Amino acid sequence: MTQAIAPRAAATTTGGVAFRVRALLLLLLAVIGAVLAGAAPASAHAALTGSDPQQGAVVGRAPTQVSLTFSEKVAMSDDSVRVLDPKGKRVDTGKATDLGGTTYGVKLHSGLPDGTFTVTYQVVSADSHPVSGAFTFSVGAPSQTSVALSDPAVGGGVVGALYGVGRYVSYAGFILLVGGAAFVLACWQRGAGVRPVQRLVVSGWLALTGATLALLLLRGSYVGSGKVGDIFDLTLLGQVLQTKAGAALVSRLLLLAAGALFIAVLFGAYARRDEADATDATDVSGRGDASDKGDGSDKGGVDADAEKRDLTFGLAIGGAVVAAGLAASWAMAEHASTGIQAGLAMPVDVLHLLAVAVWLGGLSALLVALFRAPVETQIDAAAVRRFSRLAFGSVTVLAATGIYQSWRQVGSWSALTGTWYGQLLLIKIGLVAVLVGIAWISRRWTAQLSEAPQAKALATAGAGTGTTARATALAELRTKQPTKVPANSRKSSSGGSDSENADSRDSNSGHSNSTDSHSADSRRAAQLARQQTAVATARQKRLRDADPARAGLRRSVLAEAGVAVVLLAVTTVLTSTEPGRTEEAAKQATSSSSQRSGPLSLKLPFDTGGQDGKGTAEVTLAPARVGGNEMHVYVERPNGKAFDIPEVKVAFTLKAKKIGPLPVTPDRIATGHWSAIGVQIPMAGDWEIAVTVRTSDIDQATVTKNAKIG
């Protein structure tokens, strides 16, 4: 009866753990899918803040070069900037030059025709993300153009999606590798010999190494053509290796080689040393004459303890150097490497990444220890408390560095709520707050966690019972294996008699029946072994759940891990999103280029000071865009009737760009009506419109009003 019930209990236990793991995996896949579905095709971290000629400007004669100014330094190739005439023919020389600061230019051929020209650009920002865009300017007057003003899909498509997944996997691998190793060294040194913990850390190393290699191959196509066929282009790979991002990825691979050596020592010599110490302690506690060994034994124990401390210290120093180097491979090539205070931002970013890894990676190791570690090596309350203190310190560092990074990347309250980067940052802050709240619940369970010495003893006995049962089954299985018949005894001699052949056939028939009997016995033995293993698993589950606080801790840590999966996804998207400070600067730089939806109409009251000198001048400008416009001026008396005056003059000034005043003298059409055709507005912006009204030979007044044109 016990054997019939225990397998079901074990199946329920295994099914519960498997269900939780599957739920976490489904959550991870859902988050990745939502991230990839909602991500923009290209995340521009360098914004175009100016150009010469300006976007939408109309110039009198063709320029000799086109210059572009970005919000940060960018990397350019010969084809990064292209200038196309109205027919779509390329008119630039093809070689972009650095004009100083963040301004870059490309020379144009001479003898360009009038019309609308299109400028397209595709560059790589200083934080390693691709940037693309296009704008137009006109020579003489605007014209029709055959060039479409659609942005290239740089950083998007299949390659962009693969690159995003690679970034997520690399962050996850870094967290598992660094956090898992830190958990073992700082909190639970016995965990170095626990197989599930070893698999967790090694999986982190494999994930980070594989993702780094994939990113290195994808990089050339990601910032270039975006074609899947270019992933294995060795020419592009050579170009990537010469860039800052390529150097960071190669450095990461070299550090991972050192990380492999660290893992080998941690789970090799260090784990064996810990197991030897545990065995010695058991032997000493089990022998009554252990105290009679003399000074030599004591000295050997002291030397062993000192040796272990030295090994722990060496692993801690080496691991910290490798972990800091891995974190620096992100800091030196992404957000922290550009913008304001880059010299301070990079070490702060390294601390931020290390704090995240120690916290979330240690949490993953704790989850594995609580759910997957054998009962005989069950994690103790002291180790959980040590991790609780370590996690608290990590959260403190995370908060301090995160506040600085938020100020540096957002810069204003409007950017915090009005940009995608700021909104993602608010989501991240909310998730961290939820994690801290669940961690507080975990700390309460930890405070109630008991060592449960009786449960430990039962665990050891139960483990031994399960092991003995399995060994008995295997021994029984081995004794029932069929004996191999020599080959020469199975063959009948060609010269043998018929009776000998008959005896041989009878012997073979008997051997077949014996084999069938042994096979049936083997199946029964295997079934018995499985049942006994299930009984041992159920016993371990009962012992593991003997402490209610431990069961509560497992539930809260599992909840923390689920939130951490979402937090990691949001952080990955955040690192590939244009910072709020940059986005707002780009909006301010391009706000003057926004077009009006209809003609402009302004009413300007005036008073020339003389007799009958009051009235209103109404100025209309259509279509009120960059280029040629038609202007009308209507002058009326206070009673609304047309005002017949000698002269009206209009001037346009764009003070922000120090353009103007541009005078316009309209022609008189009728009483109180003046008009001018072909009024040129060279660029969009907030223009000051000044109207000068003369009501007599000596009485005149100038009134002004600002309006957005273009």
Image (cartoon, rainbow, N blue to C red):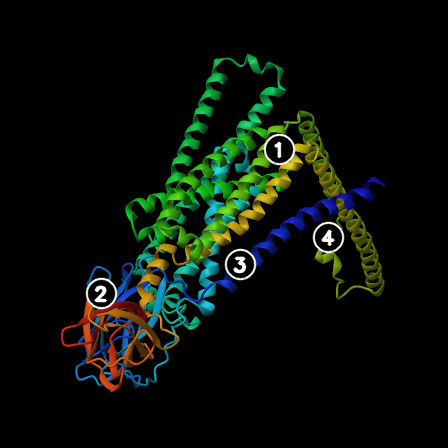
Cα–Cα span, label 4 and label 1: 59 Å
- Sequence-wise, which precedes: disc 2 or disc 4? 4
The amino acid type found where label 4 is placed reads Lys
Q: Position of residue 384 (x, y in %)?
A: 56, 33
Q: Which residue is mark 1?
A: 445
In the image, what residue occupies the spot 59% across and 34% down? Answer: 379
Q: Is residue 559 above or below residue 85?
A: above
Secondary structure at badge 4 equals loop
Q: Which residue is mark 3?
A: 32
Q: Which residue is mark 4?
A: 484
Tell me, for residue 547, which label it has, or none.
none
Question: Which quadrant does the C terminus fall into?
Answer: bottom left
Is residue 179 or residue 588 the one in the foreground? 588
**Total labels drawn:** 4
Cα–Cα span, label 2 and label 1: 66 Å
Secondary structure at badge 3 equals helix
